[in-house]
Image (cartoon, grey):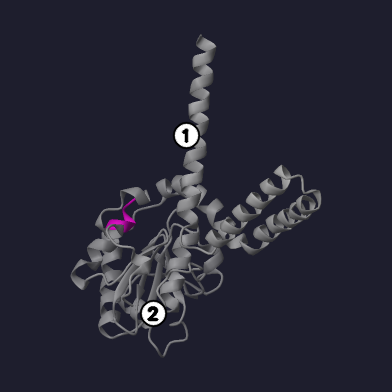
Amino acid sequence: MTGSVVDFLKMILEILIIWTIVYRVLLFVQGTRVVQVLRGFLVLLALFAVTTFLELSVLNWLLTKVFALSVLGFLIIFQPEIRRVLTQLGQTYFELLAPVPEEGLVNKISQSLLSLAQKRIGALIAFEQGIGLKAFIETGVRLDAAVTTELITTLFSPLGPLHDGGVIIAGGRVVAAGCLFPLSQKENIDRQFGTRHRAALGLSEETDAVVAVVSEETGKISIAYHGELRQDVAGSDFAFALKDVLQQKKPERISWLLRGKKYAHSPRA
């Protein structure tokens, strides 16, 4: 009797684990190009089942070869997405180790971005969290400078050589500027988004970095985190919003910042 109960509990545990994995995978691939590929795999599996049941040996052999090549092609073509999944698996632990930025630091950056927004000057700033951004730091110019309003404003000056890239802040200091961030590959992003917004989303998808972006076309400020984008954060609320998301250790506990709208789908630029 005891053995039957243990076996039943094991079965329930396995079902819960499988359901959780499938659910998380579906959430991750939603709105990406992986969805169409998964549909193709389902079609191949259905055809394979039909040919096996009807004992169509030639077609069955052909589908087996096609399926094997499809798996190999999937691993090659979707290498960035696979890397992103593996990265996110380790984010929960590393986020607990991420330091909380000082309030004075956030205030300085908020003042800088608000000033740039008023002048319609584009900006892109990433805050390193638990996952290191060394790979992206190496794409820019190392600075290791104290965070000041004047420095941030100067780095994004249209006449400056580093204004097109992103600035990375780690350990309370500006560690690099002119950095290249990966562009988001989501297919359902509004076409009005420029390169800066796609770069902000892309970096937030691959790492746990918090990314603030200013649109030079509209002067609006947005915040990207965990692949979500909150657009047009009001100037009076921006400092509070930035502190709010930086102080969270898990995406599920983010307060109003990432709730309510499908930010990446919003029609506003």
Task: Decide whether residue 75 is among the magenta residues.
Answer: no
- For image coordinates 44% across by 68% down, the residue present is 188
Question: Which contiguous range is marked in magenta?
Answer: 244-248
- Which is nearer the eye, 188 or 97? 188
How far across and down, in percent of the image, does residue 258 sit? Answer: 31, 58
Circle 2 — which element? loop
Q: Answer with the quarter of the image where residue 108 lies.
A: bottom left
Q: Amino acid at mark 2?
A: Gln
How far across and down, in percent of the image, does residue 154 sit? Answer: 37, 82
Q: Amino acid at mark 1?
A: Leu
Label of residue 108 in the image: none
Label of residue 16 in the image: 1
Quick check: can you spot residue 231? yes
Residue 180, above or below 62: below
- Which is nearer the eye, 2 or 101? 2
Circle 1 — which element? helix
Farthest residue, direction left: 236
State the residue position of label 2: 192
Which secondary structure class fits the magenta region best?
helix
How far across and down, in percent of the image, does residue 151 sit? Answer: 36, 77
Q: Answer with the quarter of the image where residue 212 lies.
A: bottom left
In which quadrant will I find the C terminus?
bottom left
- For image coordinates 38% across by 86% down, the residue present is 157
Residue 244, above or below 180: above
Q: Residues within 10 Å of mark 1 (few under 14, many from 20)?
A: few
Farthest residue, direction bottom: 159
Quick check: can you spot residue 102? no
